[in-house]
Amino acid sequence: MITADRKPFEEIKESVKDYEKIMVLGCETCVAVCQAGGEKEAEILASELRLAFGNEGKKIEVNDELVVRQCDDEFMADPAFLEKVKEADIILSIACGVGVQHACNYFNRVIKDKPIRVIPGLNTTFMGANIDVGLWEERCLGCGDCVLEKTGGICPITRCAKSLLNGPCGGSSNGKCEINKELDCAWHLIIERLETLSELDRIKPIEMYKDWRSSHSGGPRKRVREDLRL
Amino acid sequence: MRAAKRVAYTKKLLDEVGLGGERLDFFHIAASEAPMFAETVKIMTERAKELGPNPYRIKLQQESKKDKE
C-alpha cells in the first residue's frame, strides 16, 4: 500500500488559516490502513482545527468527509458530495499525493462555476508493507522491471541502499547495512533466502546494468490497457 | 502498554490545539492502593485549579452570551 504521515499540525493550520469553510477529506483506502488519512483521522483533524481556531477566537467551519478512493473519479461523482465540495473554501485532502492531485483535477473538471482549492494534509512516504502493528517498511520503488524472481522475493532495488543488482557491497557487516546498523543488508537477506530455497545458483550470473527508463527516471509513466478503454 | 501510549498521543493533540496536554494524565494505581489513588486525585485537582477552566469552553460561553444579547 501507499503509506503516509500527517503533516505537522502547525503546518496544516498555517495552510488553512485564511479560509472560513474547510473540508477535511479522508480517503478510505491505503492511507486509512496506515492510519494517516482515513475516517478516524479526518474526524480527529477536523476536531483539532475547530478547537485550535476556536481557542484563538476565530470563527471557522470545519467538516470532514470521506471517499473510498480519491484516486478514482467514480468514488467522487456523487452530486451531494460535489455540492459540499463546492460550498467549501478549501479542501484539505488527507489522501496520498496521488489522491490530492486527482481530487483537485477531478473537482476542477466537473465543477465549472468555481475554482476548487485542494491542499495536502499528509506527506506521502512510500509503497510499503505492514510489518507489525504500527510498523510499515518500504518494499517497492515501482521501477517497472521487477527482479524478485531472481532474488528470492526480496527487492534489492528498494531494500539495498545502493540498489545494487550484484551484492552485497563491502559495507555489509553482520547482516546489517553500513548506512544504518538497524537496517538489514538486503543482499544478506537475499543470499540467506536463496540458500533456504536451494537456489543460490540464481545469483551466479552477473547482472548487467539496469535499464532505468521503465522507472520514474524515464519521466512520468502511463499505463494503458486498450482492451479496457471505452 | 497501549493505553499509556494512547494517552501520550492525546496529550500531544491537546498541546497542538492549545488546550494543554497537562489536563490529561495516566497513572498506574493498584486496586489495593487507596491512599495513592487519593493522593493522585489531589495532584490532578490541584493541577486543574492551576490551569483554570478549559479556555475554549470559556470562549464558547462568551460567544453564546453575546449571541443572546
Image (cartoon, rainbow, N blue to C red):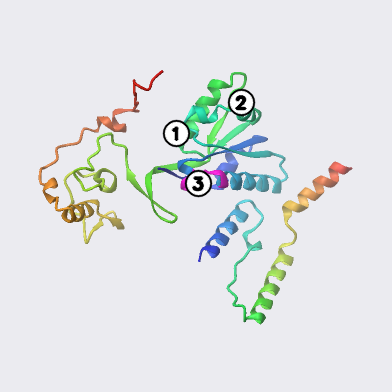
Residue situated in front as seen by the camera: B63 or A88: A88
- Mark on residue A79? 2
Residue at x 55% of width, y 23% of height = A108
What are the residue bounds of the magenta stretch?
A32-40
Measured in 3D between alpha carbons, the distance from the residue under mark 2 to the one under mark 1, in whole angstroms, is: 22 Å
Residue situated in front as seen by the camera: A129 or A221: A129
* Residue B30, percent from left and from top: 59, 77
In the rendered structure, the answer to whether residue A75 lies left or right of residue A216 reads right
- Which amino acid type is shown beneath numbered disc 1? Val
- Mark on residue A98? 1
The answer for which chain carries disc 3 is A
Q: Is residue A39 magenta?
A: yes
- Which amino acid type is shown beneath numbered disc 2? Pro
In the rendered structure, the answer to whether residue A157 lies left or right of residue A81 reads left
- Above or below, A118 relative to B46: above
Do residues under tags 3 and 2 come within 8 Å of each other at their CB atoms?
A: no
- Mark on residue A83? none
Q: The N terminus of chain A is located in which quarter?
A: top left
Question: Which of label 3 and label 2 is nearer to you?
Answer: 2
Q: Is residue B24 magenta?
A: no
Residue under pointer 3: A36
